[in-house]
Image (cartoon, rainbow, N blue to C red):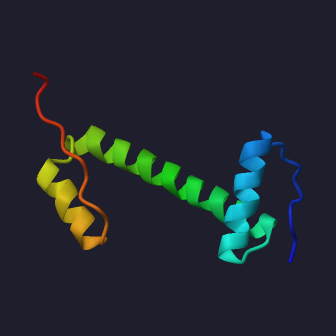
Amino acid sequence: MKVDKLSVSFEPELGDAVRAAARRQGAGLSRWLADAAAAKLRSEALAEFLDAWEAEHGSLTADELATAAAELALPSPATTGPAA
């Protein structure tokens, strides 16, 4: 498999936390970081898609968000009411 080797620098506390998270998952550090980067890219792609969708169709309603959360087995999104 072809790989792209990178060098990264972290604050010491973040480096410790990343290594600990990789150990907890039983993954190598490189695998854990690659998975984290892929998850971040998916999150950004979803945010861009939703922004474009809302620009064309309007904002998602609280009911639509709750339905999506239920279908995906996610916690219900926090709702915000009008400012007091």
The one of 62 and 18 positioned closer to us in this rendering: 18
Task: Residue at 64%, 59% (x, y): give it.
Answer: 36
The quarter in which the C terminus is drawn is: top left
- Rendering coords of residue 22 (x, y %): 71, 67
Q: How many marks?
A: 0
Q: Given the current orientation, which residue lies at the most extreme top position?
A: 84
Give the residue at x 27% y 43%: 54
- Where on the picture, by quarter, is residue 31? bottom right
- Residue 4, percent from left and from top: 86, 60
Question: In x, y percent, where is residue 21?
Answer: 67, 64
Q: Nearer the viewer, residue 44 or 33?
A: 33
Residue drawn at x 71%, y 56% as measured from the top left: 18
The quadrant of the picture occupied by the N terminus is bottom right
Q: Horizontal placement of 48 versus 62: left or right?
A: right
* Residue 34: x %, y % from top left: 72, 63
Residue at 25% in and 52% down: 77
In the displayed structure image, the side of residue 59 where residue 14 appears, left or right: right
The image quadrant that residue 3 belongs to is bottom right
